[in-house]
Amino acid sequence: MSEDSSYHSDSGSAPSPERRRVGLRGPLMGGIIVIGVGIVFLLQNLGVLWFDNWWALFIFIPAAGSFGSAWEAYRVQGRFSRAVSGPLTTGCLFVFLALIFLFNWPWSAVWPVFIILIGLGVLLGWRSS
């Protein structure tokens, strides 16, 4: 076995610190989301929070994933780029959608915000190219 082939082999070697950090991202993010949802339910049961559409809290899960992807792209590239602006815009859209359902905002009044957010995402993507 040559020195080059043993270097590329993954069998029997411990994962690098970089690989371990990325591997923990999923369980860490999942644990934080579950804890957050549990706290919201607890506060709702205690009468501190009240939401008619509590199920809309689950829309924050893909928002958190989008923000995580944007942060990871920023960390890897070291600058704001299209790879950052896309997930960042998507996360903002999910957050706004969840807020609409949570607070029963009238769709007829707030729908232009989606156009504004998409336009900002396009500008951020264009600016960073």
Image (cartoon, helix red, strand yellow):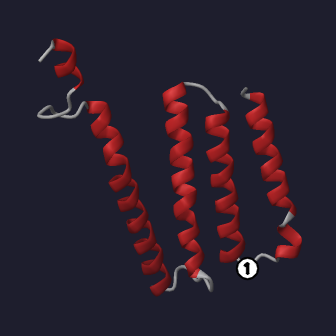
Give the residue number, with chain letter if any, for mark 1.
104
Measured along the vertical axis of the image, is residue 13 above or below residue 71? above
Name the kind of residue labelled 1 in the image. Answer: Asn
Please identify the residue farthest to the top as the structure is shown: 3
- Does residue 91 sit above or below 51 in this rendering? above
Residue at image point 50% right, 31% down = 75
Q: Give the residue furthest to the front.
A: 1
Q: Residue at x 58, y 83 (%)?
A: 50
- Give x and y (percent) for residue 47: 51, 86
- What is the x, y in percent for residue 113? 82, 59
Quarter the C terminus occupies = top right
Seen at 11% across and 34% down, the residue is 12
Graded by Cα atoms within 10 Å as few (under 14), some (14 to 19) or many (20 or more), the crowding at tag 1 reads few
Residue placed most toward the observer, 47 or 23: 23
Picture layout, residue 47 above or below residue 58: below
Give the tally of numbered discs: 1
The percent coordinates of residue 53 (x first, y second) are: 62, 82
Q: Secondary structure at mark 1?
A: loop
How far across and how far down the image is residue 33, in percent? 43, 63
Q: Residue at x 56, y 51 (%)?
A: 66
**Quadrant in which residue 112 is drawn:** bottom right
Is residue 13 toward the left or the right of residue 128 in the image? left
Q: Which of these two is toward me, 12 or 34?
A: 12
Q: From the viewer's perspective, is 89 left or right of 56?
A: right
83 w.r.t. 4: above or below: below
Please indicate whether residue 14 sits to the left or right of residue 52 in the image: left
